[in-house]
Image (cartoon, helix red, strand yellow):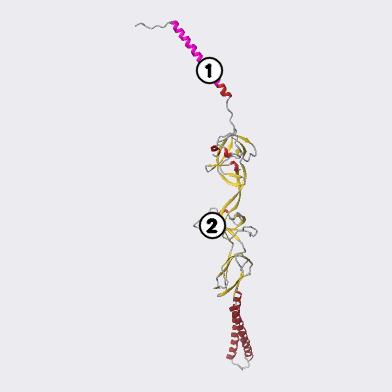
Amino acid sequence: MTPFRLDPKQTLAAATATLCVLALIGLWATSGNAADAQPAEAQTPTAKPALTVSTARPVLGRLPVQLSANGNITAWQEASIGAEANGLRLQELRAAIGDTVRAGQVLATFADATIQADLALARANLLEAQANAQEASGNATRARGLKDSGALSAQQINQYLTQEQTAQARVEAAKAALNVQQLRLRQTQVLAPDRGVISARTATVGAVVPAGTELFRMVRQGRLEWRAEVTSSELGRLKPGTPALVTLPSGVQIRGKVRMVAPTVDPQTRVALVYVDLPTSGDLAAPPRAGMFASGSFALGDTSALMVPQSALVMRDGFSYVYRIGDDNRVSRIKVQTGRLAGEQTEITSALDAGTRLVATGAGFLNDGDLVRVVEGAGAANPSPAAPRSAASATR
């Protein structure tokens, strides 16, 4: 087989052509990369702020400590006013529900004809007893004068003396019977035992009632109290004199003070009653009334607290967040725990530095990592985004 041989001139020409092609390709690639790199570096777009916001910093202050409770408004003391006379007809009623009465005021009267007759009979019996006693006393006096003369025996003298004592006893009995009838006559008038307000009336004119039947019920001295229900674990924080603020169903608020803390706790509910005295509230448009349900709180002093404006808080998925502004004006979302409210301020109970710069207005339009334009001091009341944002991102 004849071997294949290359021509040296042809080999040199082919190598020269190949080198030229490679040089052209390298020159084209170098010039292309340089051209691409220069516009990319020169045309880098500048990031635009998503929102113009104002800032706020957490501040330390003092907030009141309050203990909330619910309960009922009741009478301080309620008096039951009943009939003392037995079997008499109710003749007249002089007080109605809601009337303010004074101590000793006549509330009702009974017919007293039978008692007047019994009283006249008792007076007659007393006069008769006094006449008999006077006669017996004269006989006894004469018997004592004849004691030493022997005109009367010792037995006769003792009889006269005994008759005198018996007659005097009958006088005392007649006086007692007269006093009983006079007392019955006084009992025909039903009197108020104390000043207060009539809260109930069960009396009916013309009814014949037995002794002890309740005719009226009265709130003594018109005093009301709030009986708050407090758990046994919180009972030790209260003591007599603690201020309380009671809110009525109408929204009216009344200030009172703890009068007494119940000495026992209900073993079923583990709840104790706290008795709060309420002031007289005749000047209120909607005063408290016994039987009302009312909520309230007890003032237990104050404590230090870290507070932020309420506008800086954002609620998402049931949690509270604030947005911290970094040195590069980008925001980062921080989950926080909130506590008490004080006007436009909210307490933060979780860890948060007092010097942290927070978004004060417009936080609801931001997402984690957004770039913002910061306006120090008070921000706009209604911030508007600097660039258009989708509805989904604005409500997240």
Of residues 91 and 166, the one nearer the viewer is: 91
Q: Earlier in the sequence, mark 1 or mark 2?
A: 1
Where is residue 46? Give x, y as percent.
59, 29
Residue 59: % across, % down: 62, 42
Residue in view at x 61 percent, y 46 percent? 304
Name the element at disc 1: helix
Residue 10 colored in magenta in the image: yes
Which corner quadrant of the image does residue 105 belong to? bottom right
The residue sitting at the left extreme is 1
Q: Quadrant of the C terminus?
A: top right
Q: Secondary structure at mark 2?
A: strand
Which span of residues is magenta-colored?
A: 8-36
Say if the magenta span includes residue 317: no
- Residue 328 vs residue 208, the one in the foreground: 208
- The residue under label 1 is 30
Looking at numbered disc 2 in the image, what kind of residue is underneath it? Ala
Residue that mark 2 sits on: 272
SS assignment for the magenta stretch, majority: helix
Label 1 vs label 2, nearer the camera: 1
Q: Return the x and y of residue 172 as percentages of the image width and height.
A: 60, 81
Q: What's under tag 1, amino acid-wise?
A: Thr
CA distance separating discs 1 and 2: 90 Å
